[in-house]
Amino acid sequence: MNRIDRLLAEMTLEEKIGQLSMLAAGFSVTGPVLGGDTTGDVRTGRAGSLLNVYGPEATRRIQRVAVEESRLAIPLLLGFDAVHGHRTVFPLPIGEAAAFDPDLWEETARASAAQAAADGVKLTFAPMIDIARDPRWGRIAESPGEDPLLASLFGEAKIRGFQGEDLHEAGSVAATAKHFVAYGAANAGRDYASTDLSERTLRETYLPPFVAAVDAGVAAVMPAFSDLAGVPLTADERLIGGWLRGEAGFEGVVISDYNAVAELVVHGVAADPAEAAALALRAGVDIDMMSHCYRDGLPEALDRGLVSLPEIERSVRRVLALKERLGLFETPHAADRPQPGTPSPDALRELAREAAVRSIVLLEHRGDVLPLDARPQRIAMVGPLADARAEMLGCWSGAGDSASAVSFFEGLALARPDCDIRLSPGVGIRDGDESGIAAALDLCAGSDVVLLCLGESRDMSGEAASRSDLDLPGIQRRFAEAVLALGKPMIVLLSAGRPLCVPWLAERADALLMTWFLGHEAGNAVADILTGRRSPTGRLPVSWPRTVGQVPLFYAERPTGRPASAEHYTSKYIDGPTAPLYPFGHGLTYGRFRLGAVVAEPADAREGDMLTVTIELTNEGPLAGEETVFLFVRKPVSRVSRARLEMKGFGKLALASGETGRLTLVLPVEALRFLDAALRPAIEHGAYELLVGPSADRARLVSYWIEVGAA
Ligand code: NOJ
């Protein structure tokens, strides 16, 4: 008999349900209920997993209770949110997505996994692969942005990094793809709100990242808190049982979100905890995170015939199988495993700096204010984010200690000791205190260049942090207008977990850099860009609205029969532009790139062929730079109207000043497949337009037509 059969034969019902119950211990990172002392539950086998406990001592203590004091000695599964780093914090996911660099995404996940595992954690609730097209939704900060291909590549890379070759490895943790599915389509951008979308949009936009995650071997999936067309995902048998486990072939563990099973009662689909537990279990949710519904409701559900014992045991098997895959039965104390290949603290800081550099997006650059003049000068650093270590880590900062973060002021002071750099915040992030404004304006007036550091506080994005206004909070706008009015060379650093609607600022700054929340090395990374040690390379993973009234906003819209024009009866606003402030993919570099002609081969393609798309690039600027080039496709005529642009790939090319080079992108004709009118995947034959260029701005794309026919 194998271990799982033997254990199941020995387990009481209470112990079986215990394996399906995850309790919170130690920290109140999230959720309405806080776990008390869970030791008793672990000892009696009533808790099979815990979240929010980390650190070698704490995890050893609780794991020892499980393996030495509980009747069946089953090790605990210990989970933690390493959303963008663990002890070392990397940029927010929306920022790291801007790097458009799967190797980097994988490397930072690998480093986070090693750190989490050294802290006794073997499961992380990441990657978050929700498509986010509405910056009112605070969780856009945790997401890789608006595009399904980008989210798929991001998720795959993170899963490879977290899980490594084998979950047994010392530096590997089980990854959780979340939140299944369409959580980001919340009504009006309000977190946890209801969602409703077509089967086509679900399958074309929201499900692909989960297909990619399952194909990458993700160990766990977490259903979203929200409902989709009336069915809360936690109880969605069609999507979890049917689509995820059936169609997509997922064989891992489904873990509810925090308290989500109990919330089925509040959603109005279950009358009591027993019904809620039965709905979730039957849908395929194996672990109840922190709602106690499985523990308190499943025995009654069993008595009432709402669930069967084999259904409970099916989930227990999956949980035990994951514990086996993680090697927990052999080595329950993850922190005890030899940790070869764990990066040194210095290497981790270097990686955090690299990730931060690559996440920064240069949104505007007029004149030559950047890089900063090499000669010594007087630099005024003003604004509430100028010297704000504690803010730099952003939301979900894991086990990161903000005291060791580097602020913008600290980073620049270190990089440019020859300059006279002075600090005066002027105003707070959210308050209305005007008392510091005069001093800040004085400082700016006496300086050669001003660095204006504006934005949100770290807790204004992330979970339960939706906003209805996307301008700068507090009195920052008033302050910024006063600083701008001085007419000094002005570099603006914008910190936020989402795009902010600040066209008034974009129009007047000499340079505008989006710095998201960059993590521990924020200040050093920003200094690298400001001093010209590095050229900016980040590109927007989301369309950036001009005003909140434009959202939801995304580049892959389907055409309308009445495209916006000067005519009255067309699809537009009567009080402002329809175009975003910045398109998806936008980002400037210190180079100045000219795109030459595009050639795709074979131009007469057949199903099964591989397309090679080549574009020539020249850096006409005085400085070196790295250009990111996107490949979009468009099918102008098909039975089901297709989006105006769909991203199919991207690539990067670094060129010195004056240099010309070629970038080649490879695309299987297979990738042109889409859902036909009956939602069956098919390749429609005929003409396709390939569009290549630096962003989703149609006017800047170079086009090439191909014909696709039968094999
Ligand atoms: C709630 C969040 O929605 C989820 O993303 C997170 O993993 C859990 N809490 C656990 O912290």
Image: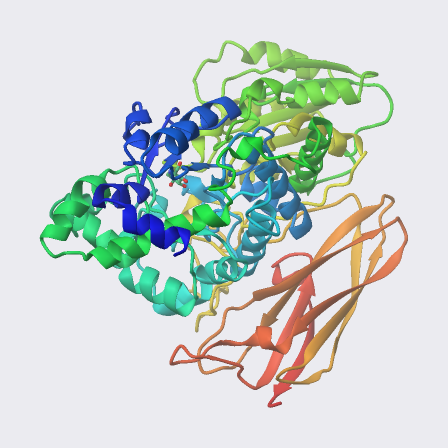
Query: Which quarter is ligand 1 in?
Result: top left
Report the side of 22 relative to 629 (left or right): left
> Looking at the image, which is closer to me, 515 or 73?
73
Residue 309 lies, in percent from the top left, at 21, 55
Q: Name the image quarter holding the N terminus.
A: bottom left
> Looking at the image, which is closer to me, 591 or 91?
91
Does the rendering let one see residue 636?
yes
The single residue placed furthest to the bottom in the displayed view is: 710
Identity of the residue drawn at 66% across and 44% down: 107
Vertical placement of residue 564 versus 188, above or below: below
> Looking at the image, which is closer to me, 457 or 446?
457
Residue 266 lies, in percent from the top left, at 18, 43
Residue 66 lies, in percent from the top left, at 38, 32
Q: Name the image quarter holding the C terminus.
A: bottom right
Residue 276 lies, in percent from the top left, at 19, 48
Does the rendering let one see residue 185?
no
Vertical placement of residue 434 versus 472, above or below: above
